[in-house]
Image: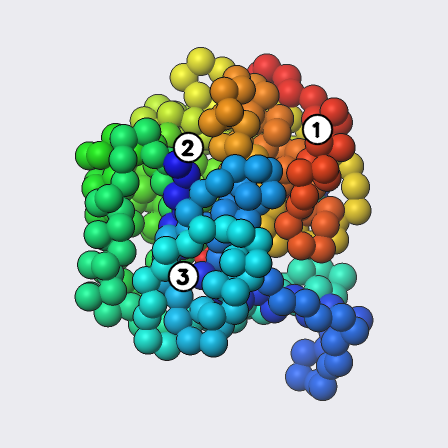
């Protein structure tokens, strides 16, 4: 069974504003609201790809109730810890460029953190645990590390999609899969990546550090896959980007959906790129039909 864990879920409030002006009254021409947070996006895309899974994490208040209601509507299993305070609202402003403001999220007190650890302790060998998104500031900075240790002791495969110090901490635990974008990969090594050659150098370094499989996404410029045996590159399919929020999370879901159904890493990587682009070209997350239409456009080459 695949489990996702979102420590800081969100309600993503997407607002389209023509000609946004800072410091003035702007009126949205289109608004839409989605349940969000990286692990929740992975759960939603997995379900759309026909893979049952369970979402873990912390939710609270009216925004938390909205997330549960939307996941129930999509028949996605969840087992959240209910916290005091409201789940955050993240603003995704579309006005030519995409600007994002992510909220802080509610305070998670130690008893709620322990309740989540209890759920992690109940995982079984060969389960997959996707740890995705930021760590709320109220949790101890080593919290992700503690989750990975518990999961790995139970022979659970750990997948990581996060950034900053949380990503650094999780790399040390040698996860099964990580999916940084090129900016997050640069930050991990206190540098800025300027080229595909740079992405190859630092992607391979993650494998040397013990990560089993690495996907480095570069938005419309394609993606790399690295493990001990191969380095692969895939061009991103061409299309009109409607909402790239959740595209990275969709790649993780696409890879896992294909890999856990027995596909090779080459095929799972191609499916991952098609899933990321299918989401970027949709207003909400992708559907399985969108992914399969794009799959034939993804050409994977060995580097
Ligand atoms: N402009 C684009 N054209 C085609 N595909 C895109 C575009 N932007 C994102 N994608 C797809 O989404 C994936 C993840 O995007 P990226 O922005 O790199 O990740 P993240 O959302 O984690 O920042 C890419 O590998 C690609 O498949
Ligand atoms: O936990 P963080 O890093 O604040 O990110 C949360 C945000 O990331 C998202 O999951 C989207 O992530 P990606 O665009 O990287 O796939 C949004 O749904 C959410 O608002």
Sooner in the amino-acid sequence: mark 2 or mark 1: 2
Residue at figure coordinates x 48%, y 63% from the top left: 68
Judge whether residue 265 can be spotted in this image.
no
Q: Secondary structure at mark 3?
A: loop
Q: Are marks 3 and 1 in contact (CB under 8 Å)?
A: no
- For the C terminus, the quadrant is top right
Q: Quadrant of residue 155?
A: top left
- List the residue tagged with mark 2: 177
Spatial separation of the CA atoms under disc 3 and disc 1:
32 Å
Q: Secondary structure at mark 1?
A: helix
Residue 220 pos. (x, y %): 69, 40
Looking at the image, residue 139 sits to the left or right of residue 129; the answer is left
For label 3, being within 8 Å of ligand 2 is answered yes
Spatial separation of the CA atoms under disc 2 and disc 1:
21 Å
Looking at the image, residue 297 sits to the left or right of residue 119; the answer is right
Q: Are marks 2 and 1 in contact (CB under 8 Å)?
A: no
Q: Secondary structure at mark 2?
A: strand
Residue at figure coordinates x 26%, y 47% from the top left: 120
- List the residue tagged with mark 3: 8
> Which of the two residues, 295 or 202, is positioned nearer the viewer here?
295
Looking at the image, residue 187 sits to the left or right of residue 49; the answer is left
For label 1, being within 8 Å of ligand 1 is answered no
Q: Quadrant of residue 297?
A: top right
- List the residue tagged with mark 1: 295
> Which of the two residues, 238 or 294, is positioned nearer the viewer here?
294
Sooner in the amino-acid sequence: mark 2 or mark 3: 3
Residue at figure coordinates x 53%, y 52% from the top left: 75
């Amino acid at each position: 069974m695949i489990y996702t864990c979102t420590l800081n879920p969100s309600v993503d409030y997407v607002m389209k504003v023509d000609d946004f002006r800072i410091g003035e009254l702007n009126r949205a021409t289109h608004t839409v609201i989605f349940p969000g947070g990286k692990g929740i996006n992975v759960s939603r895309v997995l379900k759309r790809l026909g893979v049952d899974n369970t979402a873990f994490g912390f939710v609270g208040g009216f925004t938390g109730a909205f997330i549960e209601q939307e996941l129930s509507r999509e028949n996605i299993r969840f087992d959240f810890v209910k916290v005091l305070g409201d789940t955050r609202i993240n603003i995704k402003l579309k006005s030519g460029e995409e600007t994002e403001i992510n909220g802080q999220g509610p305070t998670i007190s130690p008893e709620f953190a322990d309740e989540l650890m209890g759920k992690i302790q109940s995982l079984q060998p060969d389960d997959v645990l996707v740890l995705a998104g930021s760590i709320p500031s109220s949790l101890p900075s080593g919290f992700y590390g503690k989750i990975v240790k518990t999961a790995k002791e139970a022979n659970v495969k750990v997948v990581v999609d996060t950034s900053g110090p949380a990503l650094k901490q999780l790399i040390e635990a040698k996860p099964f899969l990580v999916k940084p974008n090129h900016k997050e990969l640069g930050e991990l090594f206190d540098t800025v990546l300027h080229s595909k050659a740079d992405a190859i150098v630092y992607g391979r370094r993650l494998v040397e550090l013990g990560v089993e499989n690495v996907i480095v996404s570069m938005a419309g410029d394609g993606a790399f896959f690295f493990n001990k045996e191969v380095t692969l590159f895939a061009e991103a399919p061409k299309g009109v980007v409607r909402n790239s929020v959740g595209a990275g999370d969709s790649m993780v879901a696409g890879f896992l959906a294909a890999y856990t159904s027995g596909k090779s890493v080459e095929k799972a990587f191609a499916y991952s790129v098609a899933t990321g682009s299918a989401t970027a070209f949709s207003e909400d997350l992708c559907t399985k039909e969108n992914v399969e239409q794009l799959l034939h456009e993804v050409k994977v080459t060995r580097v």
